[in-house]
Image (tube, grey):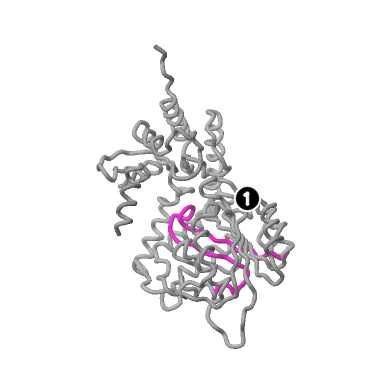
Amino acid sequence: MQVIKEYVQRWYESGLDPDEYVCHRKQGNLVEISDADTGEKRTVLTFCTNDVLGLVQCEAVKQAAIDAILQYGTSNSSTSVLSGRITLHQQLEDEISAFKHLPHTQLFLNAWMAMQAMMDAFCHLAIPVPGFQNTRETLILTDVLNHGCIVSAVVNAGTRSGKVFSHSPQVRVKAYRHCDVEDLRRKLQRYARPGDRILVVSDAVFSMDGDIAPLPDMLNVLHHYEGSVLLMDEAHASGALGATGRGIYEHFGILPTQAIERGVVPLIMTTFSKFAASAGAAISTHVAELKPLLNVSPTSIGTISLSPPLAAAALESIRQVRQRPELVQNLQANTRYLRSRLAEHDFVAIGETNVIPVILTSEINPKIFARQLMHNYGLWVSPIWFIAKPRLRITVNALHSREEMDRLVAGMVATRDLFYKPTLSA
């Protein structure tokens, strides 16, 4: 432990530790927080929540969670395979399948477990079956800026979870340049071998850059590899992209069935922590046989199933999205407005979604910039200071008013002016 002690001490001395806050209550986008170190309380306007449609405080969603507790209690106290499956799970899976236009859906406790289960199921199947032997190797291609849950899953894809030694055929993992379809094409031409099982995995919306994967072009490439699988992580796309919030396929005006018709197998991972006012994840497919494999993966069979209030909140949230398309329209209108206001004041906001990364110059520490925004203007944004391009990560949601967005921009302009305050000559 001495190495850990020394490392963390140096980490804190270098100013790399985050400013931490404790939330006490919320009302819309106004949040009462206290500094974790000093205990100082303040009410701030948040632009760092992933509650993109504002459903966390929706009365119908809260009541659904309460009703689920009254009916089932707070926990299922078992894994789904053994005795932890409840009616809400089936209803939630059916609702997601209808929402994503893929008929078979499997629930997970979170996205990290869903991705690992997918790698286990696809690359290593499940248990030895008499008379069956898989001899085909797997080639996985992953965008270099994919989310950590994808990175963690693919780097461990060579060995099935729960088994120190795997006897499955080899799994080869290659990265391609960010959203670079030509590089994806080159990597497939270079590394794909006859008989390979091909899996391409990508964020739909990239969580730190706010841009969108080039889905139609990716399908055009994979069309030449019959039976290839395209797994899209729609954590930041669900509820945000498309006219009704169905995600990246709707955004580009296509359906998963059109991918199927072209010989590509579409898989979609949906998460509930952003648009669905809950926690958990799901993988949807048109291949019925994939679901039982996912269901008996180590991350399913060895872990408690999604709790009743979480399942109920996610279920009601998705129903709210389907019944109230104006939520999605408000989010998209707010995204356009805030991005335009930032551009008017010469802020470099990359991407195109409600995830708005604002790139700062190298001499400005985003953590200090964000601290000034909070202390001076009561504005809460997320600073990202430990990657190559320091930035503020702003998330706009459907509940923000134009006045609140204008307040954010004004505070950012004033803070920038503070950092660049001219020095008067003697």
Front residue of this view, candidates 389 and 54: 389
State the extent of the magenta-drawn residues as a range.
263-292
Q: Position of residue 263 (x, y in %)?
A: 72, 66
**Residue at the extreme left:** 39
| Residue drawn at x 63%, y 66% as measured from the top left | 139
Q: Is residue 274 above or below residue 136?
A: above
Q: Residue furthest top?
A: 426
Find numbered disc 1 in the image and state the secondary structure of the residue it sits on: loop
Q: Is residue 90 above or below residue 317?
A: below
Location of residue 77 by image quarter: bottom left
Q: Residue at x 39, y 56 (%)?
A: 62
Give percent across and percent down for residue 89. 47, 69
Classify 10 Å Cα crowding around label 1: few (below 14), some (14-19), many (20 and above): many
In the image, taking residue 367 as reference, residue 214 lies left or right, namely right
- Residue 54 screen position, x and y as percent: 45, 48
Q: Amino acid at mark 1?
A: Cys
